[in-house]
Image: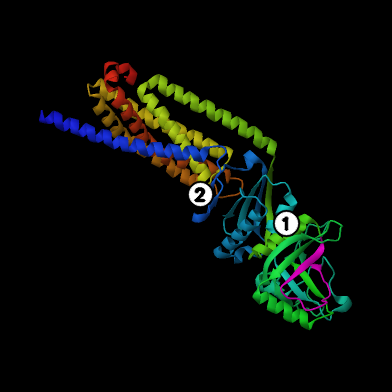
């Protein structure tokens, strides 16, 4: 009698334990269901400072776009520190975000390269010029040069370029040419004097010129330091030219008409796109390292649409097939596994949107493989259960031993595959192989989630089924797949 009481007491504790987990799982399902809802409004709570959109981030092969590999200008690669490369990456990322490409990927590659993925980009040339340009804006003293003053489009050498870029800086090729141009000093061989760089600017915006000829200018405001420098120089050089130079190229050389302070405009016969590109470069600062394009790749949106349709269809068919097999072959345990698999899928998709993870075809493949791994774990558990039932164990004992004895195999297989995924993640940090990263990330994430769903979620659902229909199942072992 005492043994019976102890046994019932242990069963009651187990039921309470799994009721607790059932409540946790229901909360997880409700939250992830809200996250994966197609028209999710996002998190916008002013009091908490939350302003986040929750949406699927599509990669190049799904959405179409461009992938560009930038590298340090030849001759500078060996002199770049890790901090300089990371600072350059951050500025490139801010410039890309300034273009409105919130789903872009910017990451370092090796010791002197930066990989930029631009999904859905419509103006390739504008994007390239925006992210590649060094963005070193200079106001250069042209006073006293007369007819020897450089013209618009000329590549000149300034002291700021020597200090911030290289002792021998170069400029972008002239129109119709392919070779970068060597910066030219004054006739006496000395560099031109930089009055102020873009560091003196507080903000820059592209605005219409107001001429009626579809011309744009860049309107800028000065910070306190820049205002002091600019006001002093313009006040003492009235009726003298001052050049506006970007990345070593003379944009314009207007004559100073009066003392300028607070704000000003940069003119240069800009189109709207060119003015916006320049404004973005000025807002987010000059690149510490000059960059050039090492490789370029384009993916068409038509291929992306076809890929999405086929991937979604394959995923749906695969999941339905697996669910049908589990329910048909394992009956009641299969129902628990099917419910756990749905929770597994919801948690995965929710994390894809929350982290967020850029979905590519390899990333979707990694998710589908992780589904197979999740099913493998359930199969190991259920086969162990069947062995215990056939050996004459009670249903409760068979469930307990099935999960306990399958755990080591599930843990070992998942961890070993996670290690392989980590190796793929490391090797995926090269141009052309970066899509492997998506596969590795979704695969590893799925395996980690599987360690939770295969044991806790499946067991909770199975225990709940046994709690309500245990007597019925004991009389019909076939419903347990035994």
* Of 127 and 177, the residue lying toward us: 127
Q: Judge whether residue 349 can be spotted in this image.
A: no
Q: Determine if the magenta segment contains residue 263.
A: yes
Could you classify mark 2 by the number of other residues whose Cα lies within 10 Å: few (under 14), some (14-19), or many (20 or more)? few
* Of 132 and 277, the residue lying toward us: 277
* The label number, if any, that marks residue 409 in the structure image: none
Q: Report how far apart the C-alphas of labels 1 and 2 lie in the structure.
A: 30 Å
Give above or below for 362 relative to 260: above
Residue tagged 1: 129
| Residue most extreme to the front | 47
Q: Earlier in the sequence, mark 1 or mark 2?
A: 1
Residue 355 point in image, percent of width and height: 51, 47
Give above or below for 233 relative to 176: below
Q: Judge whether residue 77 can be spotted in this image.
A: yes
Left or right, 414 with reference to 253? left
Indicate the quadrant where residue 456 lies. top left
Foreground: disc 1 or disc 2: 1
Quadrant for the N terminus in the image: top left
Residue tagged 2: 426
Query: How many numbered marks, from 0 up?
Result: 2
Residue at disc 2, secondary structure: helix
Residue at 73% across, 79% down: 231
Residue at 77% across, 57% down: 274
Residue at disc 1, secondary structure: helix
Indicate the quadrant where residue 302 lies. top right
Residue 221 point in image, percent of width and height: 70, 69
* Of 238 and 140, the residue lying toward us: 238
Could you classify mark 1 by the number of other residues whose Cα lies within 10 Å: few (under 14), some (14-19), or many (20 or more)? some
Residue 208 point in image, percent of width and height: 79, 59
Start-end of magenta stretch: 250-269
* Of 98 and 189, the residue lying toward us: 98
């Amino acid at each position: 009698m005492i043994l019976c009481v102890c046994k019932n007491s242990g069963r009651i504790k187990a039921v309470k334990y799994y009721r607790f987990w059932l409540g946790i799982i229901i909360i997880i399902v409700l939250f992830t269901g809200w996250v994966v809802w197609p028209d999710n409004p996002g998190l916008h709570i002013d009091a908490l400072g939350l302003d986040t959109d929750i949406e699927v981030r599509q990669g190049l092969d799904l959405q179409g776009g461009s992938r560009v590999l930038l590298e340090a200008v030849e001759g500078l690669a060996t002199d770049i520190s890790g901090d300089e490369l990371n600072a350059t990456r951050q500025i490139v990322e801010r410039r890309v975000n300034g273009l409105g490409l919130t789903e872009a990927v910017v990451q370092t590659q090796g010791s002197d390269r930066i990989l930029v993925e631009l999904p859905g980009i419509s103006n390739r040339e504008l994007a390239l010029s925006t992210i590649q340009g060094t963005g070193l804006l200079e106001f250069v003293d042209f006073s006293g040069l007369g007819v020897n003053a450089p013209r618009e489009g000329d590549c000149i050498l300034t002291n700021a370029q020597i200090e911030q870029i290289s002792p021998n800086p170069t400029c972008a090729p002239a129109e119709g040419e392919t070779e970068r141009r060597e910066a030219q000093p004054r006739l006496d061989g000395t560099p031109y004097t930089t009055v102020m760089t873009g560091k003196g600017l507080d903000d820059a915006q592209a605005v219409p010129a107001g001429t009626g000829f579809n011309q744009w200018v860049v309107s800028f405001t000065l910070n306190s330091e820049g205002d002091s420098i600019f006001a002093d120089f313009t006040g003492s050089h009235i009726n003298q030219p001052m050049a506006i130079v970007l990345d070593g190229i003379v944009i314009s050389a207007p004559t100073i008409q009066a003392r300028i302070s607070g704000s000003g405009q940069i003119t240069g016969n800009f189109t709207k796109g060119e003015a916006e590109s320049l404004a973005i470069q000025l807002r987010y600062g000059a690149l510490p390292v000059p960059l050039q394009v090492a490789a370029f790749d384009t993916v068409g949106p038509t291929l992306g649409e076809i890929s999405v349709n086929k991937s979604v269809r394959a995923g749906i068919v695969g999941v339905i097939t697996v669910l049908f097999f589990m329910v048909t072959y394992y009956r009641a345990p299969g129902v628990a596994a099917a419910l756990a698999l749905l929770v597994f899928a919801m948690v995965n998709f929710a994390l894809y949107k929350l982290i967020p993870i850029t979905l590519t075809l390899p990333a979707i493949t990694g998710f589908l493989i992780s589904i197979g791994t999740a099913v493998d774990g359930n199969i190991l558990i259920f086969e162990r259960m069947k062995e215990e039932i056939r050996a004459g164990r009670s249903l409760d004992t068979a469930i307990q031993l099935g999960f306990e004895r399958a755990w080591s195999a599930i843990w070992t297989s998942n961890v070993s595959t996670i290690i392989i995924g980590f190796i793929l993640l490391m090797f995926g940090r090269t141009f052309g192989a970066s899509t492997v990263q998506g596969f590795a990330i979704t695969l590893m994430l799925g395996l980690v989630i599987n360690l939770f769903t295969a044991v806790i979620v499946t067991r909770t659902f199975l225990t709940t089924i046994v709690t309500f229909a245990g007597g019925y199942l004991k009389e019909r072992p076939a419903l347990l797949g035994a």
